[in-house]
Amino acid sequence: MNQDNQQLTAGYDILLAQDQPLSPKEMREVIMGKLGAQCNYTEVEGKKRIIYHNGSKDIIIFAKAITYLGNPHPIFKKRIQIPKYWIEDAVSLSKLGYDVRFIGVYHFEGFIIFADFVKDSYIQHQCNNSAAHIYINDLYQGDLYDYFSKIDQNGNEIRTISNRKFAQYLQGEMAESNLFKLFAQFNYGFCFGEWLTAIDAIQEMHQKHWSQWRQAEWAGWFLEYRFSHFTEKDEIHPYIQYTALTHKSSHDPDVFDFDIWFPAHRFYGDLKASDKSKKETPGNDQIAFVECLKKYGKFWYVIYQHETIKDSDKDFEATLFRNKYLKEIDNAPDSSFDPMSYHQRMKHSVKFTDMCILEINRINLHSILSDFNQGRQPDGNPRNPKFKINKKDIDNFVIYRYHHKDEQ
């Protein structure tokens, strides 16, 4: 039975309604209508198929309707069904030189968006009637920007394309966002995949005159230290700026106290280091966040995940070093020296393993963020309410992923 779930309208509103899938004949007519005279429905290797003649390459399109995955899955999660014969036919047709595409077609009240479920990973899995998942935000991104690509949590590449640019996409004319390329550049030079100790990180930040080198939560500040230096490069600064230490004192209502400003695209983001073992990561002050989102339309959470070795498992080596180091730098009297300060929460070392960028926008705002128990200020007053980001079902918000293992 068709159940109400999230539907994206042509005006970028979200409605709760039943799916409106096109029939195979209707999908074929829509696809051929967008691709024009270069597209035919003809027999290839014993079966009638949609074939698009793109210069020297012939593209064969397998098409399925995009529909809700079903209860009890989130109402923003959809899929196409990939039958086993798609896999078998794709393998044989590829050997003959055809470029085979697994295309999903989203339809609601005449609004069409295409999705290309890049076939390679599905072929590798040799699936039997497998579901290929896609999210409402993926569809929104593809139509808003004409083209969107991401890697999902299972390592599958998904591309969404507006119906305006479907032919250009198949001709290979669509390009990745420049901002994603810049993050890839930072990631390439960052210390992914290696154990970073508090002792080394604290000394490096101090020697490079990073103002936050004293902070006990050193792993997150080390990330910000490296990111700050990256954004100071002449070729990066026009597109990404680290603003965490410069916007705090501003009284300009258009300026917000977040870590990242994207000047060329005019929106904010925040940088987070998050332990992989945690199910959520703290967000930001609710009032400021909502005001910022209202003004600039979207917000990016840039989250770097790490594995962690607690200092308690290493005889508090990092705690003892940090507190002694602070004492020596400050020439502090013995009476003020606590060698075990912050020992209960101190990290001995971390290994950054992956990162992702979440986009919060009008489509998905209310699906990811909820109250986070912030406790109280040191003076006993309650802290301003913050959001938290649940790591479960975040694929409706992920717009970019990087895994260090992908480079190995």
Image: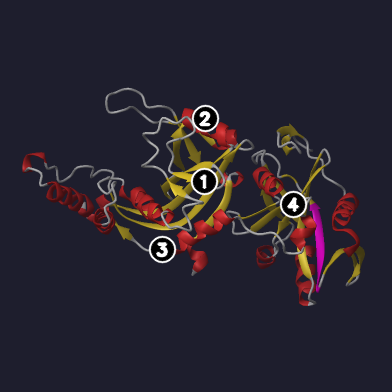
Q: Is residue 353 left or right of 382 when viewed as pictured?
A: right
Check if mark 1's residue and mark 4's residue have beta carbons within 8 Å: no
The type of residue carrying mark 1 is Pro
Residue for point 21% across, 51% down: 316
Q: Nearer the viewer, mark 1 or mark 4?
A: 1
Residue 231: image quadrant is bottom left
Q: CA distance from mark 2 to mark 3?
A: 37 Å
Residues in magenta, as a range = 56-64
Residue 363: image quadrant is top right
Q: CA distance from mark 4 to mark 2?
A: 37 Å
Q: Nearer the viewer, mark 3 or mark 4?
A: 3
x, y percentage for residue 387? 47, 33
Q: CA distance from mark 2 to mark 1?
A: 18 Å
x, y percentage for residue 394? 56, 45
The type of residue carrying mark 2 is Glu
Front residue of 236/90: it is 236
The type of residue carrying mark 3 is Gly
Q: Nearer the viewer, mark 1 or mark 3?
A: 1
- Labels 2 and 1: the sequence-earlier one: 1
Which numbered marker is on residue 263?
1
Q: CA distance from mark 3 to mark 4?
A: 35 Å
Front residue of 133/214: it is 214
The type of residue carrying mark 4 is Ile
Q: Residues within 10 Å of mark 1 (few under 14, many from 20)?
A: few
Residue for point 36% across, 42% down: 245
Check if mark 4's residue and mark 2's residue have beta carbons within 8 Å: no
Q: Nearer the viewer, mark 4 or mark 2?
A: 2
Q: Is residue 405 above or below residue 215?
A: below
User: What residue does disc 4 label?
Assistant: 80
